[in-house]
Image (cartoon, rainbow, N blue to C red):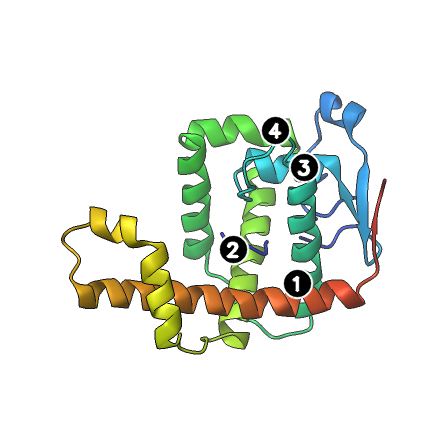
């Protein structure tokens, strides 16, 4: 699951698939518009759907809705940005693999089947959502294939900061610890580049959050 998260073109809700299945009455009664992103509406039900499916990983807070809404706004902007690009479509096997990950997160296929109708999704709706996630990952891999290598000072600082973790794993040699530090820092530096790019999308976008 990507961090941008991590959506989608629809005139009624941010996820184009929401509404393809009949939404439960209970959802409709409490649903409301949270934001409008480039003329596309993000509903409270969209935020709840992503939370219920574990498609976002908000920090521990009393109310995960604002943070999740930010993720959906950014995701929508990324999807809009890449829509004009030629990107290889994910295979059926890849999509099914992501479906299996979601099902496992929820406790199995039966649990997933039970959750879907409560958020107004069908299995095909979720597959479409996951297919778009995979397309985003492909685009990011092409646009941000790597990151600069961390400096010796950055490696040393990371190892000091994570000294307790490294000490607990006594099997790690000094060289292995440096390799782990390099992997973690390179990943973080790449994510910084992605975050900076997304910030430019947000800065120039027409985004309105409903008070």
CB contact under 8 Å: marks 4 and 2: no
**Classed neighbour count for the residue bearing mark 2: other residues with Cα under 10 Å, few (<14), some (14–19), many (≥20):** some
Where is residue 161 shown, x and y percent of the image? 37, 56
Of badges 3 and 2, nearer the viewer stands 3
Foreground residue, 168 or 39?
A: 168
State the residue at coordinates (76%, 51%): 10
CB contact under 8 Å: marks 4 and 1: no
Element on which disc 1 rests = helix
Where is residue 11 shown, x and y percent of the image? 81, 49
- Per the image, the residue denoted by label 2 is 2
Q: Earlier in the sequence, mark 2 or mark 1?
A: 2
Label 3, label 2: how many angstroms apart (C-alpha)? 18 Å
Q: Does residue 130 lie above or below 205 as drawn?
A: above
Q: Residue furthest top?
A: 26
Q: Which mark is residue 117?
A: 4
Label 4, label 1: how many angstroms apart (C-alpha)? 27 Å
Of badges 1 and 3, nearer the viewer stands 3
- Per the image, the residue denoted by label 1 is 78
Label 1, label 3: how many angstroms apart (C-alpha)? 20 Å
CB contact under 8 Å: marks 1 and 3: no
Where is residue 111 shown, x and y percent of the image? 46, 27
Foreground residue, 179 or 21?
A: 179
Q: Earlier in the sequence, mark 4 or mark 1?
A: 1
Image position of 17 (left or right of 57):
right
Q: Which mark is residue 94?
A: none
Label 3, label 4: how many angstroms apart (C-alpha)? 20 Å
Q: Earlier in the sequence, mark 4 or mark 2?
A: 2
Of badges 3 and 4, nearer the viewer stands 3
């Amino acid at each position: 699951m990507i961090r941008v998260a991590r959506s989608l073109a629809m005139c009624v809700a941010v996820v184009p698939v929401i509404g393809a299945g009949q939404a439960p009455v209970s959802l409709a009664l409490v649903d409301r518009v949270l934001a409008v992103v480039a003329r596309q509406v993000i509903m409270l039900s969209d935020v709840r759907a992503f939370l219920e499916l574990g498609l976002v990983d908000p920090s521990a807070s009393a109310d995960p809705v604002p943070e999740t809404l930010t993720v959906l706004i950014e995701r929508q902007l990324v999807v809009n940005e890449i829509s004009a690009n030629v990107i290889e479509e994910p295979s059926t096997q890849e999509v099914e693999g992501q479906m299996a990950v979601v099902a496992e997160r929820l406790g199995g296929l039966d649990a997933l089947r039970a959750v879907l109708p409560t958020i107004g999704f069908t299995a095909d709706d979720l597959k479409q959502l996951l297919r778009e996630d995979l397309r985003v990952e492909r685009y990011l891999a092409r646009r941000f294939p790597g990151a600069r290598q961390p400096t010796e000072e950055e490696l040393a600082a990371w190892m000091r900061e994570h000294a307790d973790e490294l000490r607990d794993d006594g099997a790690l040699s000094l060289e292995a610890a440096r390799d782990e530090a390099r992997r973690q820092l390179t990943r973080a530096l790449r994510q910084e580049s992605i975050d900076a790019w997304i910030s430019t999308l947000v800065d120039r976008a027409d985004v309105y959050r409903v008070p």
